[in-house]
Image: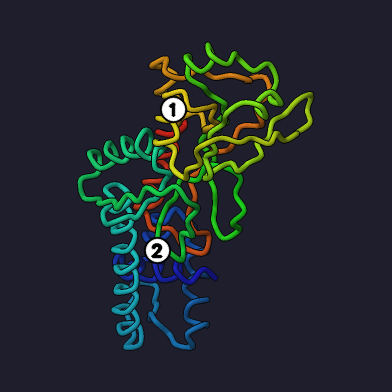
């Protein structure tokens, strides 16, 4: 027996004063309504209604049960309405994290448009060039670039990002354009410690190989590395979105494109151990659509 449906049937029988009318209202049969009422009374061990050929009347137990049944159904209806309203107009605060430049270029504009659409929402946007633990740091949603090794999060893919080698036009005129990644071993390179060390990985004929690189500068942030690269200090390797404005401005050029490794995935992540609030679901769906169109 479906207890919720039985409660609904009992309340409706009393309100309509007729098993037949209650059955019609619930798009059910009279026999099914009689069975539902009988099963409810059997489970409770009491008679709820006195039934004669002419009328139905509540017993004392029936009157007490009717009041509680109405309260339960009203509470469920309020809960449904509350969640429905929250889904239509989310409210509250979310903490969101993303890599610094990707956050500036892609996440922050999407967050702004989201907040304009949902004025009752607030977002704390944390931009960091390091891998964060969402649960330990109290974050609701993260944008992650690269392979995911954290099994405690759920990931929604939104795109892929290339890893590109770039150099300034002036440096290429002075030293020449490398024909193969191994040429970099003899050329000045800038090491971006957030994604690469002293060995850069490339791919040729389906197989990966590494090239040892060296140079005068190593840094954990992309902005100063891009500035140094554009100034002609050496070759650099970056995620494509990091270098995109510089390439578009013709301050950097991409080289060795035929030897790039597989693009890295871009994912929206959130803790798998939580039941997501409506506001988080709405935000995730918004960001999936925004990022898929921009990445």
In the depicted structure, whether residue 136 falls above or below residue 28: below
Question: Residue 227 appears at what percent x and percent y?
Answer: 40, 30
- Along the line of sight, the residue nearer the viewer: 129 or 291: 129
Question: Residue 213 appears at what percent x and percent y?
Answer: 64, 35
In the depicted structure, whether residue 117 falls above or below residue 137: above
**Is the N terminus in the top left, top right, bottom left or bottom right quadrant?**
bottom right
| Residue 293 circle label | 1
Crowd around label 1: few <14 · some 14–19 · many ≥20 (10 Å): few
Where disc 2 sits, the SS reads loop
Nearer the observer, disc 2 or disc 1? 2
Name the side, left or right, on which 222 lies relative to 151: left
Q: Of all residues shown, which one is farthest toward the top? A: 173
Q: How is the structure coloured here?
A: rainbow
- Along the line of sight, the residue nearer the viewer: 177 or 259: 177
Question: Residue 292 appears at what percent x and percent y?
Answer: 47, 31
Instruction: Inspect this view and state whether residue 295 appears.
Output: no
Q: Which residue is mark 2?
A: 138
CA gap between label 2 and label 1 equals: 28 Å
Residues under numbered marks 2 and 1 in contact, where contact means CB atoms less than 8 Å apart = no
Instruction: Inspect this view and state whether residue 186 appears.
Output: yes
Crowd around label 2: few <14 · some 14–19 · many ≥20 (10 Å): few
Which residue is drawn at the image coordinates 54% and 48% (left, top)? 155
Which image quadrant is residue 221 in? top left
């Amino acid at each position: 027996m479906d207890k919720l449906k039985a409660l609904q049937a009992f309340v409706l029988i009393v309100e309509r004063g007729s098993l037949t009318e209650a059955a019609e209202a619930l798009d059910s049969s009279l026999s099914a309504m009689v069975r539902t009422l009988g099963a409810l009374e059997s489970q409770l061990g009491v008679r709820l209604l006195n039934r004669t050929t002419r009328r139905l009347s509540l017993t004392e137990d029936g009157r007490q049960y009717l009041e509680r049944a109405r309260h339960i159904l009203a509470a469920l209806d309020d809960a449904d309405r509350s969640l429905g309203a929250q889904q239509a107009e989310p409210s509250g605060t979310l903490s969101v994290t993303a890599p610094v430049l990707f956050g500036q270029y892609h996440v922050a504009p999407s967050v702004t448009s989201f907040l304009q659409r949902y004025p009752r929402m607030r977002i704390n946007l944390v931009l960091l060039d390091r891998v964060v633990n969402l649960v330990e740091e109290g974050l609701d949603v993260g944008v992650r670039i690269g392979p995911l090794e954290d099994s405690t999060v759920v990931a929604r893919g939104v795109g892929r990002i290339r890893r590109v080698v770039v150099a300034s036009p002036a440096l290429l005129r002075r030293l020449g354009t490398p024909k193969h990644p191994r040429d970099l071993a003899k050329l000045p390179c800038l090491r971006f410690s957030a994604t690469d060390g002293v060995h850069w990985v490339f791919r040729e004929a389906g197989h990966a190989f590494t090239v040892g690189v060296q140079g005068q500068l190593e840094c954990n942030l992309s902005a100063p590395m891009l500035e140094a690269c554009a100034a002609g200090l050496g070759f650099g390797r970056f995620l494509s979105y990091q270098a995109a404005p510089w390439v578009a401005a013709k301050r950097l050029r991409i080289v060795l494109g035929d030897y790039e490794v597989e693009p890295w995935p871009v994912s929206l992540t959130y803790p798998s151990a939580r039941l997501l609030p409506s506001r988080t679901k709405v935000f995730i769906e918004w960001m999936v659509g925004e990022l898929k169109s921009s990445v």
